[in-house]
Structures are given as structure tokens and as C-alpha cells.
Amino acid sequence: MTQRTDTPPTWDERTQLVTFLDYARDTARAKCEGVSAEGACKAPLPSSPLMTLCGLISHLRWVEYYWFQVIFLGEELAGPLTEATDDDPDPEMRTAVDIPLPQLLAEYQEQSARYRRLVSDHDLNSAAKRSISDGRHVDLRWVILHLIEETSRHNGHLDVVRELVDGRTGA
């Protein structure tokens, strides 16, 4: 069982932000524990055919990649996000059903560790190398807060999908 806490070991701003992001990440992983391979790929909401446990975990992984590596560090876009179009805006969710959930979770966990190091190596006031859609350059603090919000919102989706897939609630 995934251990998680939202209480930081110290009360400085960075530790509090990282603790809440890790808590949201751990909650996403906990919502996937014990699901069958079939259940991980099931899309139980007729109006949301991409909303599977696999798709949501893949989305969380690639959203973090986008904000930390593409926006904050200024790297070139890579991976499934390069295939995004107006007709297929979330290819990372569509293609995720072809990847076993344990692999997606392992990649997400590994990436989270890398981003934890990135956050520890940069000042929270450091500006992103790339601008967001309105032309402004957000700082690292904003990126972390945005990812806390994004991950927490998708945890609600994971909760609903998991309950519809096999009845499991909580986590």
C-alpha cells in the first residue's frame, strides 16, 4: 500500500510545496493499486472514451514533463505530446492503454524523483525559459502549484473511474 502524507517534515515553503505535490502523486498511485490489467484500460464513462486509469496516469506523467522540461527548462517537446492535434489533443491518454499500468506507474515514479531533484536545484523564483500562452514566464513556484492543482483534479477522475471499473473507493 502506498504510504502518503500531506504534512511536511519542515515548514519552509519549498518543503510544503514538494510535500503537497508528492501527496497528490502518491494519491494517484494509490488509486491504481490492485486494479486488474483489464480494469486499468477500461473507459467506463461513455462521454470520455480516453478516461482510463492508464490514460490518466500517462497524462499526469506527460503533464509534468511538459511543465518541468518544456516550459521551465526550455527543452524541445518530445514523446506522445508531439502527436497532439485539434482532433487528438491528448494522444498520451489514447496510447496509454497499450502500456501496462505497472510500467506507467514506474515511469511516473522515476520521473517524479528526477523532478524532485530539479526542484531542489532551482530557486522557486527562477523564471521558466519558455513563456505560457499569454506570453508571460511563470516561475518554478507557479509550476509546482499548477501541478498540485492538475494532479489533485485528476485524482478526482481516477477516483470516479476506479469506482466504476471495480467498485473500489477511497485511497
Image: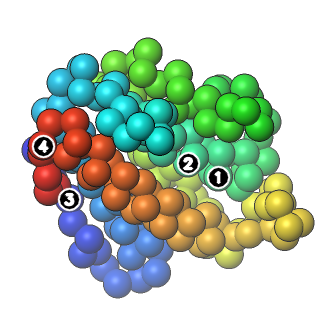
Q: Is 83 positioned to the left or the right of 169 in the image?
A: right
Residue drawn at point x = 61 percent, y = 29 percent: 91
Residue 67, which numbered label? Answer: 1
Q: Classify 10 Å Cα crowding around label 2: few (below 14), some (14-19), many (20 and above).
A: many
**Dot 4 lies on which element?**
loop
Disc 1 and disc 2 in contact, CB within 8 angstroms: yes
Q: Quadrant of residue 11?
A: bottom left
Q: Nearer the viewer, residue 98 or 46?
A: 46
Task: Mark 1 and mark 3 in contact? Answer it, CB < 8 Å.
Answer: no
Distance of label 1 from label 3 (alpha carbons): 23 Å
Instruction: Name the residue located 14 percent from the left edge and 52 percent from the top edge.
Output: 169
Q: Is residue 57 visible?
A: no
Q: Earlier in the sequence, mark 3 or mark 2?
A: 3
Q: Amino acid at mark 3?
A: Arg
Tell me the quarter of the image containing the C terminus: bottom left
Q: Position of residue 95 (x, y in %)?
A: 52, 22
